Image: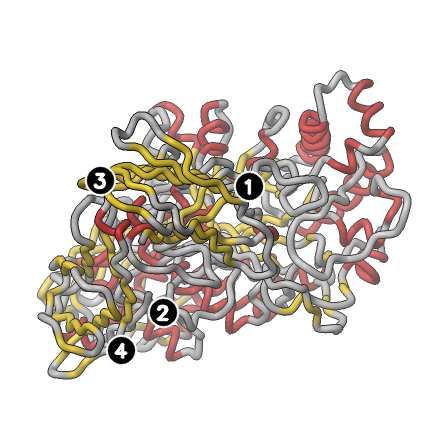
């Protein structure tokens, strides 16, 4: 559901400005005082001492209008100083009558202060106003991730990504270097990693859920030489960004096994993966494997000064280990309970080796399975539960839940959005994210050291699409991780400026902040209601089957009392914005009350339970967004209550199929009826059946039943079988509109 509201809204309905908004700075500083009095500074002369770590400040100065570099300190009207009394990443910026002073608790703090000055100047005209800005980040880890294994990005493109991170005060770059689909870092001791593992013979075309799979037939790959790695690390270090390399183990290792098959549990050959997903071929925990990984880690450590090495640990199927005589004997010899404890054994052993080299490990939250390695930092991605568990065990945690931090998800429900993996993560959702879970005990909150945005690149083939998927939401994430006090509506005014700056540079920036995102209320036993909660007040036109209806104002509820094609559009200066069309079918279910015995997942809760009886059919291609409800490992059991006894003849239920993303059709769907809401009588049961497409409609016809309560039970498929993506995990069930006639 999409319509773009043009930027004229900001000019017509300006937000009430605070000092933060007047500054134009993102992420928002903790304290801003911009005075009405102008300074006498109409041009800035900057002296930067050599070899003191100010390289990025010099680079940024050359890009700042009105700043000239001078060769002697006497000619400078900016004073840069390290003030150890400030927090390490904190800074203070003073624009005075004839001088600018920037103090930082470290070189990083000084850099952040100068970055704020750069943004402030881009937003102001000389002479600059007198101002005071004081700032310090809320979290000490503020990261963005980049997967270069599914799709490869050049050295210059990685540098552009790092420039973006530096501009928004990120201090960590998680570089995902190895995968099933490619090994991207040169390891001199193992040349086949460059010769074989770095290349796949072809690549999947379209989405993984499209059947049958099709491929482009073109060899694809590449890797970074160790000299190129050093170049990128130096570039990041100059920007006070720590580069954290990820070397996946024990799963996601198919590319390495293709080069060195003796590291696997199988007897045959392996091939670098040509499609996405999870593969059962993983490292076998033999002495030969551990020696290989130790040698790899030795070379990796020599290239990366960061204290962290990310070892993955996620999505490691256990089938190969279950079928391996060696692994089963190892489990017995080590007194392990099962394959999950074998994974813990694997991770703990590698952690000890990495710790012996003066480094610490980070792993995805699966490393909790079978017991957490003693000194590990956990990156919680499957939700907040892994982070909560690790923090309660006194381990550092980096929060990165898929609900808010996965930038490979769709960022709009616009039907013309470029292909993405699925899901729906809007810029507003990113901005409003709180990294520390509310239910974490006060004394454990210190273990949540920060958060990270992840950019997986299965469907991101080039840097222009990377910009589109990451940059807009990356700006929002920077403020979510830096600023303590956040206000989304206030953020938008500054975002407008930044979007313009990047667009002028040629960046392919997404622009979704003023889309009409309807909040549709249904399932309450009353009429369907539509609300558009825009950050600015404006008139929204409304028509039904092309016949004009009464206009509404943003924030005003619109009752939907007739079926048909309802069209909404912004009305500005007599001109209509692009339309948003909502096709409502007011079937009998739309006036019922609804509740679920099992709540849908927070990730996929739409506009609440009423999303599936609001009269709108969801997308046939995307399971994220406001119409589909997702249930993780649970049955979907909906109870509809009618105001009086109601004749039910036909019921249709829609389900999504995407087994590559662990989304399965239900085993069966049952209709039950009741007169009192307590005693239910089975009416009919049907299998969901199989299909080649993505949508399955289960239809119950000629029921001829009269009731006040109707129960629809969709039985979750259950545990995903061996050999399939996500084997061993509980499947997802996605349910759309229940249509009752």
- The circle on residue 667 is 1
Q: Secondary structure at mark 3?
A: strand
Q: CA distance from mark 2 to mark 4?
A: 48 Å
> Mark 2 or 3, which is nearer the eye?
3
Give whichever of discs 3 and 1 has the lower sequence position. Answer: 3
Rate crowding at label 1 as few (under 14), some (14 to 19) or many (20 or more) other CA atoms within 10 Å.
Answer: some
Label 2 crowd (10 A; few <14 / some 14-19 / many >=20): many
Residue 286, position in %: x, y?
84, 33
Question: According to the image, label 4 marks what residue?
Answer: 578
Query: Which numbered disc flags the more N-terminal residue, 3 or 4?
Result: 4
Real-space Cα separation, disc 3 to disc 4, in angstroms: 43 Å
Q: Nearer the viewer, mark 2 or mark 1?
A: 1
Q: Residue at x 48, y 70 (%)?
A: 418
Circle nearer the viewer, 3 or 4: 3
**Would you say residue 376 is visible in this rendering?**
yes
Q: Is residue 71 visible?
A: no
Identify the residue position indicated by label 2 in the image: 46
| Residue at the outermost top position | 335
- Between discs 2 and 1, the one toward the N terminus: 2
| Dot 4 crowding, Cα within 10 Å, few <14, some 14–19, many 20+ | some
Between 496 and 277, the one nearer to me in the picture: 277
The reply to whether callout 2 and callout 4 are in contact (CB within 8 Å) is: no
Q: Are marks 2 and 3 in contact (CB under 8 Å)?
A: no
Q: CA distance from mark 2 to mark 1?
A: 69 Å
Kindly identify which numbered label has been placed on residue 645. Answer: 3
- Residue, x 57% and y 64% (percent of image)? 459
Q: Are marks 2 and 1 in contact (CB under 8 Å)?
A: no
Query: Percent from the top left, x then y, of residue 449?
Result: 44, 37
Whole-percent x and y of residue 324? 84, 33
Q: Earlier in the sequence, mark 4 or mark 1?
A: 4
Is residue 28 toward the left or the right of residue 668 in the image? Answer: left
Q: Is residue 725 left or right of residue 282?
A: left
């Amino acid at each position: 559901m999409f319509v773009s509201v043009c930027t004229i809204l900001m000019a017509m309905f300006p937000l009430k400005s605070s000092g933060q908004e007047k500054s134009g700075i993102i992420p928002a500083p903790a304290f801003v005082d911009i005075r009405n009095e102008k300074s006498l500074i109409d041009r800035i002369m900057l002296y930067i001492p050599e070899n003191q770590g100010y390289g990025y400040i010099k680079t940024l100065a050359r890009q700042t209008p009105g700043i000239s570099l001078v060769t002697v300190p006497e000619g400078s009207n900016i004073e840069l100083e390290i003030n150890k009394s400030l927090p390490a990443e904190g800074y203070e910026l003073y624009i005075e009558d004839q001088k600018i002073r920037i103090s930082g608790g470290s070189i990083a703090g000084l850099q952040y202060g100068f970055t704020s000055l750069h943004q402030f100047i881009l937003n102001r005209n000389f002479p600059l106003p007198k101002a005071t800005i004081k700032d310090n980040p809320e979290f000490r880890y503020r990261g963005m991730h980049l997967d270069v294994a599914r799709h490869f990005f050049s050295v210059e493109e990685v540098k552009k990504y790092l420039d973006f991170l530096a501009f928004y005060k990120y201090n960590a770059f998680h570089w995902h270097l190895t995968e099933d689909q490619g090994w991207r870092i040169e390891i001199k001791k193992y040349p086949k990693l460059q010769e074989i593992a770095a290349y796949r013979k072809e690549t999947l075309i379209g989405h993984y859920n499209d059947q049958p799979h099709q491929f482009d037939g073109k060899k694809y790959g590449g890797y970074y030489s160790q000299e190129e790695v050093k170049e990128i690390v130096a570039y990041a270090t100059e920007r006070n960004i720590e580069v954290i390399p990820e070397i996946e183990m024990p799963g996601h290792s198919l590319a390495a096994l293709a080069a060195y098959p003796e590291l696997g549990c199988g007897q045959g050959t392996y091939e670098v993966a040509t499609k996405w997903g999870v593969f059962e071929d993983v490292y076998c925990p033999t002495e030969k494997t551990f020696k290989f990984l130790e040698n790899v880690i030795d070379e990796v450590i020599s290239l990366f000064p960061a204290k962290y090495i990310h070892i993955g640990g996620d999505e490691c199927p256990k089938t190969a280990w279950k079928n391996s005589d060696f692994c089963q004997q190892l489990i017995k010899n080590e007194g392990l309970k099962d394959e999950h404890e074998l994974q813990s054994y694997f991770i703990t052993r590698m952690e000890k080796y990495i710790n012996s080299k003066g480094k610490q490990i980070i792993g995805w939250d699966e490393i909790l399975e079978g017991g957490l390695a003693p000194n590990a930092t956990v990156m919680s991605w499957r939700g907040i539960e892994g982070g909560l568990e690790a923090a309660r065990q006194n381990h550092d945690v980096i929060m990165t839940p898929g609900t808010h931090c996965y930038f490979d998800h769709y960022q709009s429900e616009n039907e013309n959005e470029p292909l993405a993996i699925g899901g729906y993560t809007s810029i507003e959702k990113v901005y409003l994210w709180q990294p520390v879970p509310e239910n974490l005990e006060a004394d454990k909150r210190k273990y949540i050291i920060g958060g990270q945005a992840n950019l997986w690149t299965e469907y991101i083939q080039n840097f222009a699409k990377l910009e589109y998927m990451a940059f807009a939401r990356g700006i929002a994430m920077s403020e979510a991780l830096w600023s303590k006090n956040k206000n989304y509506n206030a953020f938008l005014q500054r975002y407008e400026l930044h979007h313009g700056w990047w667009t002028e540079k040629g960046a392919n920036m997404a622009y979704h902040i003023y889309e009409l995102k309807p909040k549709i209320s249904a399932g309450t036993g009353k009429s369907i209601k539509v609300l558009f909660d825009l950050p600015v007040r404006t008139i929204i036109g409304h028509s039904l089957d092309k016949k004009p209806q009464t206009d509404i104002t943003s924030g005003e509820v619109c009752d939907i009392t007739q079926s048909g094609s309802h069209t909404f559009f912004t009305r500005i200066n007599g001109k209509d914005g692009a339309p948003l069309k909502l096709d409502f079918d007011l079937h009998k279910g739309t006036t019922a009350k609804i509740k679920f015995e099992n709540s849908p997942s927070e990730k996929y809760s739409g506009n609440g339970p009423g999303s599936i009886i609001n009269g709108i059919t969801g997308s046939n291609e995307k399971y994220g967004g406001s119409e589909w409800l997702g249930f993780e490992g649970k049955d979907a059991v909906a109870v509809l209550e009618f105001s009086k006894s109601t004749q039910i003849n036909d019921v249709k239920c829609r389900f999504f199929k995407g087994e590559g993303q662990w989304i399965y059709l239900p085993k069966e769907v049952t209709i039950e009826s009741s007169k009192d809401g307590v005693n239910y009588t089975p009416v009919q049961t049907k299998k969901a059946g199989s299909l080649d497409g993505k949508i399955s409609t289960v239809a119950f016809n000629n029921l001829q039943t009269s009731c006040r309560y109707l129960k629809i039970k969709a039985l979750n498929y259950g545990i995903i079988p061996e050999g399939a993506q996500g084997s061993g995990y509980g499947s997802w069930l996605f349910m759309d509109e229940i249509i009752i006639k």
